[in-house]
Image (cartoon, grey):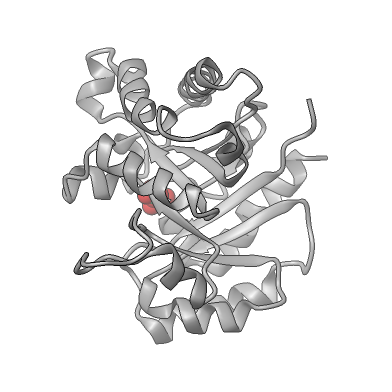
Amino acid sequence: MTAKPKVLIANWKMNLGVTDSLDLAKEIKSLIPASGKTKVRISASSLVLPELAKLLRGTRIEVGAQNVHWAESGAFTGELSVNQLREVGATFALVGHSERRNIMNESSDLCAKRASGALLQNFNIVFCIGETLTERQSNQTEQVLVSQLTPLLQTIKLDCLGRLVFAYEPVWAIGTGKAASVMEIEHAHSTIAKVVSNHFKQANPLIVYGGSITPDNFSEIAGSTFVDGGLPGGASLNASKLLAILNILEKSTE
Ligand code: PGA
């Protein structure tokens, strides 16, 4: 099996306006080494994507959206298509983030439709899944991961996997300051890998972890062979913390 690349995805959520996003991106651009083994992505507000893509053109940092629609175009008020995102320089989108699933009530079927539509248009997708605290406490973690993954895996083809990154983000760890333990992460990541390979035998999926990642807790997490990268939210709003997280990932490939 070939070695998998590592991936770092910064999720800025709805935190920064255009000016602040560009200022932070300039700082990140000046700090991050021009090349390295880790793929670096920033998921920003769609409003800033055109300027952000211009600013980061020619660097190793890719920019992407926080959601995407499945259709190529049409009467879908408030949505963004792959074509629209591509035109402004975005190369990927998150889909199924827990804030979309739990606050905006996006179902696993809807998330699967978004992701598979975009994947079929050759777009890159970071597909987020994870259980709530109640689900974990009632021993339903595996079941939840299976139910969030299955609608997607049933609608895509093997060749889509190259454009797909899975992000395990337990809801109880997001923005709470309480990251999952390495054991919990390894169990979830191996469940995800198993479910994916039940659908696609040859699969070797990329699975990153997200949920209260900091430079202080990430070395242990990134040291696990089950972890292919990280998806920091809060910590990604600080250029030096993001650089420190990137350095941990780079070290983990040595
Ligand atoms: P957090 O967010 O790092 O602030 O917990 C992670 C995410 O929601 O993607």
Q: Nearer the viewer, residue 16 or 244?
A: 16
Q: Which is more toward the observer, 128 or 240?
A: 128
- Is 68 positioned to the left or the right of 10 in the image? left
Q: What residue is shown at x 58% (from left), y 83% (from top)? A: 54
88 and 191: which one is in front? 88
Q: Farthest residue in the top direction?
A: 139
Q: Position of residue 62 (x, y in %)?
A: 60, 65
The quadrant of the image that shows the N terminus is: top right
Expressed as whole percent of the image width and height from the top left, the position of residue 196 reads 51, 23
At horizontal 37% and vertical 65% (from top left) the residue drawn is: 81
Q: Is residue 23 visible?
A: no
Which quarter of the figure is the C terminus placed in?
top right
Instruction: Kindly identify the residue that appears in the image at 37 percent across and 44 percent down.
Output: 177
Counting the numbered discs, the total is: 0
Quadrant in which residue 144 is drawn? top left
Q: Position of residue 10 (x, y in %)?
A: 50, 58
Instruction: Say whether residue 241 is visible.
Output: yes
Counting from the top left corner in percent of width and height, residue 218 is at 57, 41
Classify 217 as above or below 145.
below
Above/below status of 86 relative to 163: below
